[in-house]
Amino acid sequence: MLETVNIGKRYGKVWILKNINLKIQRGEILALLGGNGSGKTSLLNQFAKTSKASEGEIILDGRNTRESFAGKIGMVPHSSFLYFSLSIRENLDFYVSLFGVNKEVKERRINELSEIFEFFHYLDTPLRHLSEGLIKRVSIVRSIIHDPEIILMDEPFVSLDRKFADMLVSIIKKGFSFDCLERLPKERFFIFSTHFLERALEISSKIGVLNKGKLVALDEVGVLENNEIIKFVNG
Amino acid sequence: MSKNFKLYISVILAVARKDLRMELRNKEMIPLMLIFALVVSLIFGFLDLSFGNIGERNMDLYSGVFWISILFASILGFSRSAMIEKEAGGLVQFLSIPVDSSAVFFGKLIPNVLFLFSIQLSVYFFIIVFFRAPVSERYILLILTSSISIIGIAAVGTFFSTLSAKTNLREIFLPILMFPILIPLIIASIKSTSLLFNNKGWEEVIDWVKLIMVYDLVSITLASILFEKLLDE
Amino acid sequence: MNLLFVSAVIICLFVLIFVIKFEKGLSRWLGISALISLSWALYSIIFIAKLDRFQSVPQKIFYIHVPSAWISFVAFFLVFIFSLKYLYTSRSRDDLLANSFAEVGVFFNTLVLITGPIWAKPIWGVWWTWDARLTTSLILWLLYVAYLMLRSYIDDFERRARLSAILGIFSFLNVPIVHYSVLWWRTLHPAPVVIRSGGMSDLPMSMHIALWSSCFSVVVLFIYLVRKRYKIGKFINLKEF
């Protein structure tokens, strides 16, 4: 189980996250909703361990040290953390080699995933020549290519066109089960943030709504009334 | 234990390879550093000439030219390297890797040492050409000695360029951070290369070289330990 | 000389009145002791300490110069300690203390760099000699300034504290190396009259009195200033957070 206990984060005087308490089980999909500046990205950064909490802690299976999370996280950030002068293959190669993935496995994964996400033919093109949507897909592949337990995505549907957005939805629903990845869907945690309410309802098993850094609603999909969510998401 | 160590080494190599590959592709840093070093050497060449070739009588001048070129070129180079990482948001993502962040430090250190090493060879070349300095086997010793210093400059440069990339002001700030820390290294390096340029014996130089080695050791150890704290956000 | 002393005492008295009126508790006692010990130190420097045979009056600067140099070094060491402590505890108090030590330390260090040339000019004829100890002081000053400048350029509290702590640690561990490199490079400073391998020797008693009184008053002043700076810092933090 992955849980946050009273997470708070502040910059100077401003608390961008406060009193965040939530639990998520393996196999569950949590959607974070909220307007701009509500703290969705900050909370995802807490899960990704790329930001240190000002108070509170995140606990994975009973452990809260950075070491216990190391290597288990894959994240699609809002703006891609990729090197634009390198090709797709070089970017993925580099990232995967940070996690000690075996060479054949790495090749297999790059090939399979680039086929599925339809950028196989661009593998050796430098990123700076590629479109935003394609870069987003590369970013998505990068987040799962080392087969992490915790997958985080910050507004993944932005810059994806209809076709790939639908594809992403079905991939998420199938729990990222690919031939080249060993982990079973029920072993993974998946947390994502989005503006698109319909997508959230479509995919996730749990929804959390953030407003000004506070968690104002958290429940199984279906329990929360749609209009309640809309009220929080818009205001 | 051995598996972790192998992973540690492979991360170092992956980061080093990535940085080298990027520089070879972009060709930004090295030409910039090279031109800068050339200009500095040229200016000192004019000075030397207008003072009636004082370099020939007192070869300490060569030492000064050498280290000024290297130091200022390295400031340029390091600022650039940190900027690249910052643009790719790369620094934070190294926090979730399964090895200690010091691997990233070493991975970035290696290419920086190599870049500075090639720049230093060029500066020696400029000195020989512009100052008509006599060439001899001395230069092997010179290169050896200055290479040891360069490791220290690269260590401090890599570390502090990463630090300054985390503040709002980048290139502007790096000299203020780096130079006071580098002063003992600069003193020892200038001294040792001066002695070698002036054909003094190795016994005189060795003390300074020992100091440089201590400096290198301390900086590298400190930098690798503190690097993780640097990446925290 | 007398005029100098009397005017200094009058200034001290004025400041004493302010201190008694506005300070409370420990600060008041510290402020009062600082002023009293400063006055006594001045008295002993001017009237008790014997005139040095060779250097005459300018030598008296030594009584301000040396304790300031010592305390600025100690202050930097404290910056180091509290930087380490902050990285371990992440408590804003430790960072604030480190900052306070740095600010007061740089003040005394500046004093060293001002009194040094004032001493040097009549003795050696030039304002600056690349003397080992003075050069090391200058480098220390640069390290201090880099630390303080770094702090001024970062707005976010946590980042500022963390990065300056890192710089503080790195800078301090550099100091021994600075010391040796500069020492080997230059050795012009008058052989340390106070601390030699044999221990305190050679100085007549009167000079000892002046030196240690000055030292004591510098330490008290230092503590007073650091506490003041710390309190101001806490107040600012409270307003911002």
Image (tube, coloured by chain):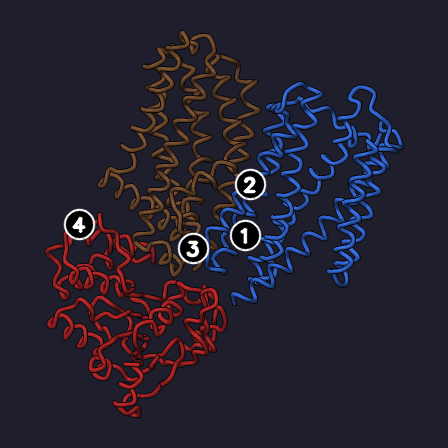
Judging from the image, mark 2 belongs to the subunit labelled C
Provide the secondary structure element on which disc 2 rests: helix
Mark 1: give few (<14), some (14-19) or many (20+) Cα within 10 Å.
Answer: many
Residue A65 lies, in percent from the top left, at 48, 67
Q: Nearer the viewer, mark 2 or mark 4?
A: 2
Relative to A183, say whether B173 is above or below. above
C-alpha span from label 1 to label 2: 13 Å
The amino acid type, in three-letter code, at marker 4 is Pro
- Residue topped by disc 3: B231
Provide the secondary structure element on which disc 4 rests: loop
C-alpha span from label 4 to label 3: 27 Å
Q: Which chain is red?
A: A
- Residue topped by disc 4: A126
- Residue topped by disc 2: C143
Q: Quadrant of the N terminus of chain B?
A: bottom left
Q: Are marks 1 and 4 in contact (CB under 8 Å)?
A: no
Provide the secondary structure element on which disc 3 rests: helix
Residue C140 lies, in percent from the top left, at 59, 38
Is residue A63 found left or right of A35 in the rendered image? right
Judging from the image, mark 4 belongs to the subunit labelled A
Is residue A164 found left or right of A4 in the rendered image? left
C-alpha span from label 3 to label 1: 14 Å
Mark 4: give few (<14), some (14-19) or many (20+) Cα within 10 Å.
Answer: some
Residue placed most toward the observer, C34 or A65:
C34
Provide the secondary structure element on which disc 1 rests: helix
Q: Nearer the viewer, mark 3 or mark 1?
A: 1
The amino acid type, in three-letter code, at marker 2 is Leu
Residue placed most toward the observer, C119 or A78:
C119
Relative to C145, say whether B67 is above or below. above
